[in-house]
Amino acid sequence: MKTLQSFFSRIFNKKSAGNTYTAPPKYGDQYSFTETMAMLERIFRQSGWQYERDNDENLVVKYQGESFLIEVAKDGCHCRIWDLHWYVVPLDNLANFALVRKAINECNVKSAITFFYGTNDEEQEMYVHTKIDINWIPLISDFKYYLQSIFDVLLGAHHHFYREMEILRQEEYAKQNP
């Protein structure tokens, strides 16, 4: 509990020492896409995180070995963060394919993260992806920690998925071996 209190006091404390991260700039009632992108790039540079812009004006950032795709809304006030292709299943493994679909459904019921799967017929593979939609909250003064927590939640979603897969495997085993 103390860790959680420390986290929230750190990200909501506007007077934190050495704070160089700011909320996205507002112009009247509008957020600026350009300034929000600049703020994110500044956070990534200052944090030493590798990043690049893709052709669609999205950001791809490396955090703890994982690549996250960040789509900033054109109004600049919210974004969608994707963790793409982090679990792969061959399409010819029908039992595992069905298990993954069930695990995704369970995760979607139990989590704030949205789990998806997509297939690539050419590669004959199914991929699992996760995403989260976040709003920029002007009271948060240290967006580095805010983003770190979001990335950590997305990484934690992997563990949630693997746990659901294990539960489903155990249930299948129990059905086949009464």
Image (cartoon, helix red, strand yellow):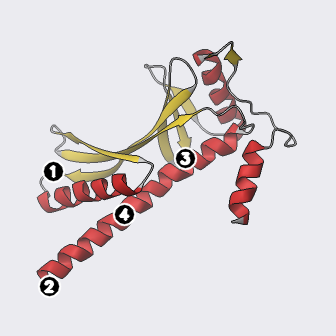
Q: On the picture, is 11 further left or further right than 108?
A: right
Residue type, label 4: Tyr
Residue type, label 2: Asn
Q: Nearer the viewer, residue 70 or 124?
A: 70
Local secondary structure at mark 1: loop
Q: On the picture, is 124 further left or further right than 148?
A: left
**Gap in Å between the C-alphas at discs 2 and 3?**
40 Å
Local secondary structure at mark 3: helix
Residue bearing mark 3:
151
Q: Residue furthest top?
A: 28
In this rendering, the answer to whether 5 lies above or below 36 is: below
**Gap in Å between the C-alphas at discs 1 and 2?**
26 Å
**Gap in Å between the C-alphas at discs 1 and 4?**
19 Å
* The C terminus sits in image quarter: bottom left
Residue 175, given in percent of the width and then of the height, sits at 15, 79
Viewer-nearest of discs 1 and 3: 3
Local secondary structure at mark 4: helix
Q: Which mark identifies residue 177? A: 2
Residue 64 visible in the current orientation = no
Q: Which mark identifies residue 162? A: 4
Residue bearing mark 1:
91
For the residues bearing labels 1 and 2, Cβ distance under 8 angstroms: no
Q: Residues within 10 Å of mark 1 (few under 14, many from 20)?
A: some
Of labels 4 and 3, earlier in sequence is 3
Residue 153, given in percent of the width and then of the height, sits at 52, 52
